[in-house]
Amino acid sequence: MTRCEWADSSSLNQQYHDEEWGVPIHDDTTLFEFLVLEGAQAGLSWETILKKRNGYWEAFDQFDAEKISTYSESKIELLLQNPNIIRNRLKVNSTVLNAKLFLNIQKEFSSFDHYILQFTAGKTIQNTFIKMSEIPANTPVSDAMSKDLKKRGFKFIGTTICYAFMQAVGMVNDHTIDCFRYKGLS
């Protein structure tokens, strides 16, 4: 069975690739989870984040944006002591801020999913990459998404993070065309 080459680096990456990466997600809580995780990943490997994913789930109230938006300074200090997450003050603070802004978008657009799909005209962008080296780190679509989210006040939401988010939640199909997952997601 042929997979995208990055997936073969570990069993954790392989499982994530085979079961989740690139599968279209429309559930707002899961979309928020990936916003948090992709922001936490900045400067780190995705495998590091996958290893801490359960820790994030527990520490951040199952990615409940309503709850996270009310975190106090004392709650943030507790999070910064938690070895099961990335203990970076800027990243933790951005999660709380982004939760508040996420809720604003939900109110404005009726869901975050409705908002985010405007960037791809409501459908998955089907790419036809042969090699991983062809896959870009960002695109004009991720540039536009990042720009709009930054304008709304989001942090840790640069164009590269936005593109990784798009890949993770199935806004783009970046499985290489020889990967067994490619056709199932196109």
Image: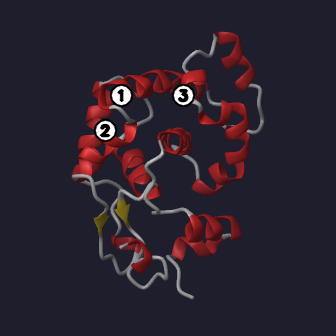
Mark 3 crowd level (few <14, some 14–19, many ≥20, 10 Å Cα): many
What is the three-letter code of the residue carrying label 2?
Tyr
- In the foreground, 178 or 23: 23
Q: Secondary structure at mark 1?
A: helix
C-alpha distance separating marks 2 and 3: 16 Å
Q: Secondary structure at mark 3?
A: helix
Numbered tag placed on residue 65 in the rendering? 3
- In the foreground, 125 or 143: 125
Q: Which residue is mark 1?
A: 105
- In the foreground, 118 or 154: 118
Residue 105 quadrant: top left
C-alpha distance separating marks 1 and 3: 12 Å
Marks 2/1 in contact by CB < 8 Å: the verdict is: yes
Numbered tag placed on residue 115 in the rendering? 2
In this view, the residue farthest toward the top is 73
Left or right of 143 in this view: 182:
right
